[in-house]
Amino acid sequence: MAMKLYHRPDCPFCWKVRIFLKEIDVDVEEVTIALGEKNPDIMALNPNGTVPVFMDGDLLLWESAVIIEYLADKYPAAALMSGSAIERADIRQIHGYSDSRVGKILFPYIKHVREKGLDFLGHDTRQATTEGWGEIQKILSERLGNKKFFGPNFSAADCALIPRVTLALAYGLTFGDDVVNLKKWYRECVKRPSFLATLPAVLPGIDEMIKPDLFNI
Ligand SMILES: N[C@@H](CCC(=O)N[C@@H](CS)C(=O)NCC(=O)O)C(=O)O
C-alpha cells in the first residue's frame, strides 16, 4: 500500500517531512489541509488533531519527528541521519531545537503577521521575536562553524530548519549581518530540488506567492 501524508503546505512540521520525502525520493499520496480546517480524517486518525499525519500501509504516525525517524530507519541509504553516534545525536538535538525553541519564538510573530499584518505588531511580540530570532541565528551559526550542513552531510536537522528560516524571512524577519555561516548554509539549502519542489504556492496572510528573490540573500 502506498504512503499517505495529510499536511498543510505552510506548516513547518509538515514541510520538514515533505522535504525529507523528496530527499529519499519516495512517492507519497498527499492530502492537503487548509489553515483552520478541522479535517474529519485527521480528527479520527490523530488524537492530537494536528498535521502531519502519515500512513505507510497499516502504520499510522502523527508526530513529525517520529515520522522522520521512521523514514530515516527505513531508507538509510539516503543518509539523512548518518554519521557517528555523536553526529547523529547532534542531528537529533538540532532537529529538536528547531521544533521547540525556534518554533516557539517564531510562532506568535508569524501568527500575528498572518492575521493582522506587520503594522499592528505589539511592542512585546516585536521585542521577544527580535531578541529570540537574534539568539537563534547566533546559536545556529556557531553550531555550523565551517560545516556546509548541520549533519556530516545534508540531514534531518537541515530538513527541519529550512522551513523555519524560510517562514521567518517570508514573514519579514531578516538575517543579522554577522551570521555569515548561517547565511551560507541557507544559500546552499535553497538550491536543493527538495526545497524548490516543496515550496508552498501561497502563504496565509501574504498576498503574493513567495518571491524568488527572497532567497537571494
Ligand atoms: N508535535 C507535532 C506538532 C504539529 C503541529 O502543531 N501542527 C500544527 C500545524 S503547524 C497543527 O496541526 N495545528 C492544528 C491544531 O492544533 O488544531 C508534530 O511535530 O507533528
Image: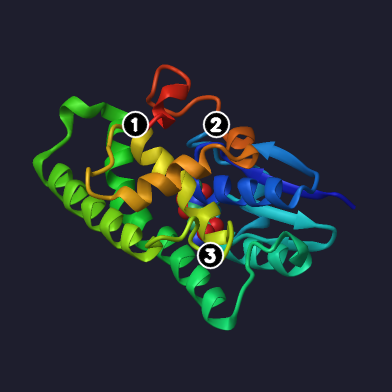
Q: Residues within 10 Å of mark 1 (few under 14, many from 20)?
A: some
Residue of label 3: 151
Q: Is residue 32 left or right of residue 171?
A: right
Q: Is residue 48 visible?
A: no
Q: Could you tell me which residue is drawn at 33 percent across and 39 percent down?
A: 111
Q: Residue at x 43, y 17 (%)?
A: 208
Residue at image x 46%, y 52%?
A: 161
Amino acid at the residue labelled 2: Pro
Q: Secondary structure beneath disc 1?
A: helix
Dot 3 amino acid type: Gly
User: Which sits in the foreground, 200 or 151?
Assistant: 151
Q: Marks 1 and 3: in contact by CB < 8 Å?
A: no
Q: Is residue 55 left or right of residue 157?
A: right
Mark 3, ligand 1, within 8 Å: the answer is no
What whole-number distance in Å separates the C-alpha atoms at marks 3 and 1?
Answer: 32 Å
Instruction: Estimate the x, y position of residue 205 in percent, counting from the top left.
Output: 38, 26
Q: Secondary structure at mark 3?
A: loop
Distance CA(mark 1)–CA(mark 2): 15 Å
The residue singled out by tag 1 in the image is 114
**Label 3 vs label 2: CA separation?**
25 Å
Residue 27: give its label: none
Residue at image mark 2: 200
Image: 42 above or below 139: above
Q: Position of residue 168 (x, y in %)?
A: 35, 40
Q: Nearer the viewer, residue 57 or 86?
A: 86
Q: Amino acid at mark 1?
A: Arg
**Which residue occupies the extreme bottom position in the image?**
85
Task: Work out which quarter of the rendered image holds the C terminus and state it.
Answer: top left
Q: Residue at x 31, y 48 (%)?
A: 180
Q: Residues within 10 Å of mark 2 (few under 14, many from 20)?
A: some
Q: Earlier in the sequence, mark 1 or mark 2?
A: 1
